[in-house]
Amino acid sequence: SMSHCAPKQLASCLPKVVPKLTEAFSDTHPKVKSSAEDALGEICKVIKNPEISGISPTLVGALTDSSGTLRALEALIETEF
């Protein structure tokens, strides 16, 4: 995937990419939603910051299902950088 081949270039695109992926999470077509989740999962695999990589599944979960928002906020609050 592109995320592993060019992580620095991907990082510069994230402010444009992530909002589009989160929009796709609410798409009515299940394959669109699934593809957006897969893409964000691939992006998370190249996170080098250990604090963020440790909580990235929780953060992605909150983006894909709003019931995980409180858990994600708690994880962020508890994270020491």
Image: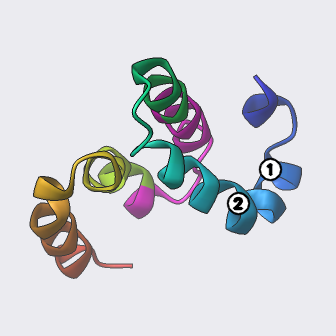
Placement of 26 over or under 12, stated as above or below: above
Asked if the magenta segment contains residue 50, the reply would be yes
Classify 10 Å Cα crowding around label 2: few (below 14), some (14-19), many (20 and above).
Answer: few
Q: Which residues are magenta?
A: 37-52
Asked if the magenta segment contains residue 4, the reply would be no
Q: Which residue is mark 2?
A: 14
Q: Residue furthest front?
A: 28
Query: Which residue corresponds to the image point at 88% horizontal and 52% vertical from the top-left?
Result: 9
Give the x, y percent position of residue 44. Answer: 53, 43
Q: Which residue is mark 1?
A: 10
The image quarter containing residue 72 is bottom left
Placement of 64 over or under 3, stated as above or below: below
- Counting every numbered tag in the picture gives 2
**Do the residues under discs 2 and 1 have CB atoms within 8 angstroms?**
yes
Considering the numbered disc 2 on the image, is that residue within a helix, a strand or a loop?
helix
Pick the residue in front: 18 or 56: 18
Mark 2 residue type: Leu
Query: Which residue corresponds to the image point at 87% horizontal and 40% vertical from the top-left?
Result: 6
Considering the numbered disc 1 on the image, is that residue within a helix, a strand or a loop?
helix
Q: CA distance from mark 2 to mark 1?
A: 6 Å
Placement of 11 over or under 78, stated as above or below: above
The answer to whether 42 appears left or right of 63 in the picture is: right
The answer to whether 46 appears left or right of 29 in the picture is: right
Mark 1 residue type: Leu
Mostly what secondary structure, the magenta segment?
helix
Give the x, y percent position of residue 13. Answer: 80, 59
Give the x, y percent position of residue 78. Answer: 17, 76
Pick the residue in front: 36 or 10: 36
Give the x, y percent position of residue 17. Answer: 70, 55
